[in-house]
Amino acid sequence: MAIAPGSRFGPYAVTAPLGEGGMGVVFRGRDSRLQRDVALKLLPDTFASDPERLARFQREAQVLASLNHPNIAQVYGLENADGSACIVMELVEGETIADRLKRGPFSSHEAIEVASQIADALAAAHERGVVHRDLKPANIKLTPNGTVKVLDFGLAKAVGPKASNPSLTSMPTVADGSAIGTIVGTPGYMSPEQARGKEVDARTDIWAFGCVLFEMLTAHRAFEGETATDIIAKIVTAPPDLNLLPKDTPPSIRMLLSSVLNKNSTQRLQHIGDARLFLDGTLTTAPAKSEAVPAIRSTSGKLVMVLLAAFLAIVSVPAVLYILNTPKPAPSMRFDLSIPGILGGLALSPNGRTIAYVAQPADAKRMLWIRPIGADAAQQLPGTEEASGILWSPDSRKIAFIAEGKLKKIDLAGGNPNLLTEVGSLRGADWNSSGIILLARTSSNVIERITESGGPITPVTKLDTSRQEALQALPVFLPDGNHFLYVSVGGKPEDSGIFVSSLNASEKSTRVIALQPNRFNGMSYASPGILIYSNEGKIIAQRLDKSGSKVQGSPTVIGEDVDGNFSVSNTGLMVYHKAAPEAGRQLRWFDRNGKQGADVGPVRNYGNVDLSPTGDRAAVDMIFENNRDIWVIDLARSVPSRITFNPGQEWSPAWSPDGQRLAYVSNRGEYKNINVIMEKSATGAGMETKVETGGVASIPVHWSQDGKYIVFSRQRSGGNGFDNWLLPLFGDRMPKPYLESTFDRIQSRVSPDSRYLAYTTNESGTFQIVVQTFPDPNGGKWQISAEGGVQPKWRRDGRELYYLSLDGKMMSVPVGTGPSFTAGRPLVLFQTPLTVNRRSPTRDRQYDVAPNGSFLISVPAANTAYIPFTVMVNWDSLLEK
């Protein structure tokens, strides 16, 4: 039913519009029976057409109508007419607090007077079991005679959702008003438990009361943000800025604000009536005027202590009762967090207030940035050039990071980073409150320690030869700061898992969780007693006992399809990043000036790209129907043909020099999931053959043009990365090492004349391109890149070498391969759409060079949308109890 001035709604004459809010349109009306002006709040039609909700409101209205208090706008009744519902309320003249704040903040005296009346109204309602749930300046009126009236009391519950939804995972409210059918409230004034979707009680009104008082004194909201998501993030994680309060704010009011705005509802002021102790100045002592009156000061001090003790007793009783009647666990809530320009993952500070990440703006250096989680503005940390890897100190005041193989520490209070030690690359680290940092260096494969001030690195664990343990990684301290968890990779899959050890080197490590690390990307401990780890694209939470040595209950999946990036704070926040969809890349031609040409093949999740010797076909590995296989694409017709069909994973194809066969890696079950090299016809016809490489995990990378060798990456003894090995295709065909060291050597390519080998290595601390004589590496060695590079490729005539710079540019270096090798200065050809992970570059070969000099590149598909981070609040509610 549409009403307008001049119409009637039952016995009420509609005289003028008053406003419109989240719960309906409000009109001024005239009660023809009692001859008084009233406020008519017309409820939405969806409300009136719901018999269940209307009946419930009728019951609530009876309770609301019983609230006869001078500071509460009274509800007179509920009327129905022509399918519409209308609340009839007391008409209150005057302006709202929101209107008054447009002229600036209240004086302390004015704010205290208004707050006292609000507290009286809340106390009266709470005694009758009525909770407002949407207290805010717009719902509080200041009448001309100085009386404060709280409006819409209890209507938030009355018009709220029909039933609670235990799996709410989206934003619970909207920014400017309440919404029918959702959790009702306004973000700037919602309590943390209300924002998390928990059932609320009187303490949520106490929180909102604090927000209103803060705003009256400062003319600023206690929790501000550009969007509802930003505001809720601050409510959950950040304290209000009490420094905004005027200097003349009484100490008792500051104490009151700290008490009512406590994020833990069990530690918050429990009864609004107790606010009078602060508002009336009862808890404030008069300053002593002279040292000559110590007895008065002493008496005042005793009085304060007595009053504080009485106050704490008053507060503690309901707190104990509340604890004894513990509410049901609140549902989890998720919302998105966008971070433009981020490279890799982010790290939450332990206190949950700040995120740290690495970014590289256009035409700028790669740097470390920090940003309050509820803000848009970020701060660059000077002196953190080329940063990678982020480790927060337990007190959230310092950050350790790696730059060019060096471990550095920066104090967020100011100053330049301090060098702690040389570490190379890491497979994880953690920092305890005693100032000890655990490291998992790729050069040692065991867990080591160093102090936060630097000094020598000393081992804490050693490899278990009985399990043929290959490596240990991702150390995580347990709460005692002495014991820690880590991931172990054994010689056999069944010997791997998560182990517990201690800083006491004599204590034997024991396995806590048996698992096979497969895309194991991170691990974190969250109190009380919950281990969180990322494996096989899932974030998994597992309860542990107090010692951290035994599991309790079953594991719970918190998130799926995750790319491995996640971080957890000590305050109940989790941030993780979803993986890109499978259909995420497109093969596309580029000329040497960067001009884009035609697309090739379908949009798929491509890995390696290898062009045939004649350039007419491309061998790729792609994920299709949840399995990675080798495919060959006819470039002229853009038609892909599947080559492998095994349920295992196959990838990294390499062409034979005659273009007839392909070598590739497979981890199929019959070979105990160890990476083995297979060979098959490039047409897909016939049987495939296993290539013997000594029973060690091996990945083919290139087939020399003279047909004599397959160059492959072989897992180093101890599991510390890969070395270059050669498989002779003549003689005894016994594999032999080309180069062995403690550093990674990946993405190898033999020159067209089969005399040199170009590869990527991190032996200098940064991944660089190096060329060495082939097949004997002792004839000479030359570094090609100056500022880092990956994925080298030769021009088909051998006179030019290409590679990707660490910022994704296609680089060109003129080379000579005559009697002696020569290399010119690296030049930029064009900026590619590819992103290089400087800390751990992909082992995939994402491009290749055709005989005509064109580049075939696997680029992100145009329809691949940016995937924001997911912030999860109250994630532990998903765990089994």
Image (spheres, helix red, strand yellow):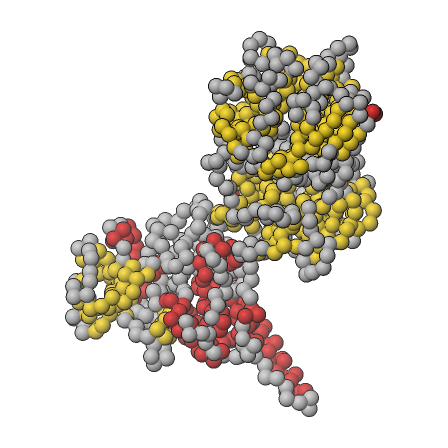
Instruction: In the rendered view, tell whether residue 740 sits above or below residue 307.
Output: above
* Residue at x-position 58% and y-position 34%: 593
Rendered location of residue 731, percent (x, y): 77, 9
Instruction: Please identify the quadrant where the N terminus is shown.
Output: bottom left
* Residue at x-position 58% and y-position 28%: 855
Q: Residue furthest bottom?
A: 292
Which image quadrant is residue 816 in? top right
Rendered location of residue 288, percent (x, y): 63, 86
Instruction: In the rendered view, tell whether residue 826 sits above or below residue 569.
Output: above
Q: Is residue 812 left or right of residue 193?
A: right
Q: Is residue 333 left or right of residue 820?
A: left
Give the mark count.
0
Q: Is residue 133 left or right of residue 638?
A: left
Which image quadrant is residue 632 in? top right
Instruction: Please identify the quadrant where the C terminus is shown.
Output: top right
Q: Nearer the viewer, residue 590 or 275?
A: 590
* Residue at x-position 40% and y-position 61%: 133
Whether residue 18 is visible, yes or no, is yes
Rendered location of residue 783, percent (x, y): 76, 34
Rendered location of residue 227, percent (x, y): 46, 55
Whether residue 347 is visible, yes or no, is no
